[in-house]
Image (cartoon, rainbow, N blue to C red):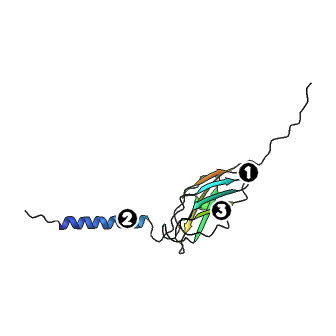
Amino acid sequence: MKIDYSLHNSLLAGAALLLFATIMSSAAAGQANPSKELKATAASATSITITWTSPGDDSLTGTASQYDIRYSTALITAANFATATQVSGEPTPKIAGSSESFTVTGLTPNTLYYFAIKTADEVPNWSGLSNVASISTLDSVPPAAIKNLAVQQ
């Protein structure tokens, strides 16, 4: 009995091609990768420093062209990213894998803020949303002065 494997081999080749195409499209070839390690690392009463690892131009390699950093007092999602406040003076992206940081100033004391980033390549193809980091600015109001201090004997 002779078994014909040509149909089986064609199906395997087709499945492998489909898997490759799926991987390439999900990696968004030619599109900047989102920053995934965004952290809010330091706060004062009116400023917060965020840090992240720079993504690449084409997925995880090269150098992206620009960042769009935004913040809000509400949780940032892909649906509301455009309505969050955009910072000005974002840094120019470094080569993929580099440490980046940026200090957002002019914030309100004792307030919880959320931060997110999108990254673009030279076209610009924009990445998806980074992870969202949050931190509160510090309280800048000192305690009230004691007005009834007395010495008892």
Q: Name which residue type carries label 3.
A: Phe
Secondary element type, mark 1: loop
Asked whether the residues under the numbered discs 3 and 1 touch, taking CB atoms below 8 Å apart as contact, a structural biologist would say: no
Which residue is rendered at x = 59% and y = 54% of the image? 133
Left or right: where 83 falls relative to 46? left
Which residue sits furthest top?
153
Q: Quadrant of the N terminus?
A: bottom left
10 Å crowding of disc 3: few (<14), some (14-19), many (20+): some
Secondary element type, mark 2: helix
**What is the x, y in percent for residue 16?**
30, 65
Instruction: Name the residue tied to disc 3.
Output: 102
| Residue 145 occupies quadrant | top right
10 Å crowding of disc 2: few (<14), some (14-19), many (20+): few
Secondary element type, mark 3: strand
Which residue is rendered at x = 18% and y = 68% of the image? 6
Q: Name which residue type carries label 2.
A: Thr
Residue 109 - label: 1
Q: Name which residue type carries label 1.
A: Pro
Which residue is rendered at x = 64% and y = 51% of the image? 135
Instruction: Name the residue tied to disc 2.
Output: 22
Q: Nearer the viewer, residue 98 or 143?
A: 98
- Residue 114 to residue 3: above or below: above
Asked whether the residues under the numbered discs 2 and 3 touch, taking CB atoms below 8 Å apart as contact, a structural biologist would say: no
